């Protein structure tokens, strides 16, 4: 996708602070962090969101990468939250599938503010 920010990050055309990467997935620091740890886990293949023909194999890669990020960021023991905004009501702003990994402090009991 020519005009997709996250495709450009995957291709190394836009800089990002990479936390973890393999052939299928990249994880990098969010530009506008909402918690002490805020990492985006992104499949390298372009999908608009979770409803855009995502395979089980890709999702398995994402889950494995979330584990790598949690370990790299010291979240394994204390815990963290994963969010995938999907569509307008969720406030999705970047139309390339991504998973927010948030943590580093107590995030509160509510799922949404
Ligand atoms: P969404 O609202 O779509 O779920 O989340 C998009 C996220 O991407 C936001 O948290 C935003 O801060 C982040 N973001 C947008 N553009 C960039 C960018 O160019 N680099 C990085 N690292 N994060 C970005
Ligand atoms: Zn893309």
Image: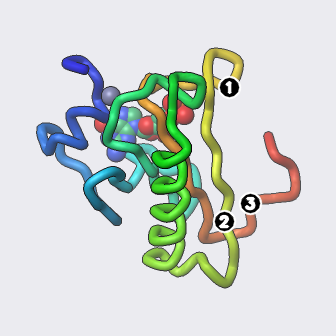
| Pointer 2 residue | 80
| Earlier sequence position, callout 2 versus callout 1 | 2
| Earlier sequence position, callout 3 versus callout 1 | 1
Residue at 61% in and 19% down: 87
Quick one: quadrant of the C terminus?
top right
- Say the numbered circle drawn on residue 107: 3
Mark nearest the camera among 2 and 3 is 2
Nearest to the observer: residue 70 or residue 32: 70
Write down the quadrant of residue 78 in the picture: bottom right
- Say the numbered circle drawn on residue 101: none
Residue at 24% in and 18% down: 3
Please identify the residue farthest to the right as the structure is shown: 109
Position of residue 14 in the picture relative to residue 105 (left or right): left
Bin the neighbour count of mark 2 within 10 Å (Cα to Cα): few under 14, some 14-19, many 20 and up. some
Q: In which quarter of the image is ligand 2?
A: top left
Position of residue 66 in the picture relative to residue 28 (left or right): right
Mark nearest the camera among 3 and 1 is 1
- Note whether ligand 1 is within 8 Å of mark 3: no
Residue at 35% in and 52% down: 25
- Note whether ligand 1 is within 8 Å of mark 1: yes
Residue at 26% in and 33% down: 7
Q: Are marks 2 and 3 in contact (CB under 8 Å)?
A: no
CA–CA distance between discs 3 and 1? 18 Å
Quick one: quadrant of the N terminus?
top left
Please identify the residue farthest to the left as the structure is shown: 13
| Pointer 1 residue | 90
Nearest to the observer: residue 95 or residue 64: 64
Q: In this view, does 35 lie above or below 12?
A: below
CA–CA distance between discs 2 and 3? 8 Å
């Amino acid at each position: 996708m020519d005009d997709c920010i996250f495709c450009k990050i995957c291709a190394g055309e836009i800089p990002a602070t990479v936390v973890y990467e393999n052939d299928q997935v990249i994880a990098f620091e969010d530009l506008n962090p909402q918690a002490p740890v805020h990492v985006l886990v992104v499949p390298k293949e372009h999908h608009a969101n979770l409803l855009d023909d995502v395979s089980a194999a890709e999702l398995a890669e994402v889950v494995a990468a979330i584990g790598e990020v949690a370990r790299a960021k010291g979240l394994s023991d204390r815990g963290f939250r994963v969010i995938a905004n999907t569509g307008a009501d969720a406030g999705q702003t970047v139309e390339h599938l991504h998973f927010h990994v948030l943590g580093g402090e107590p995030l509160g009991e509510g799922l949404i503010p």
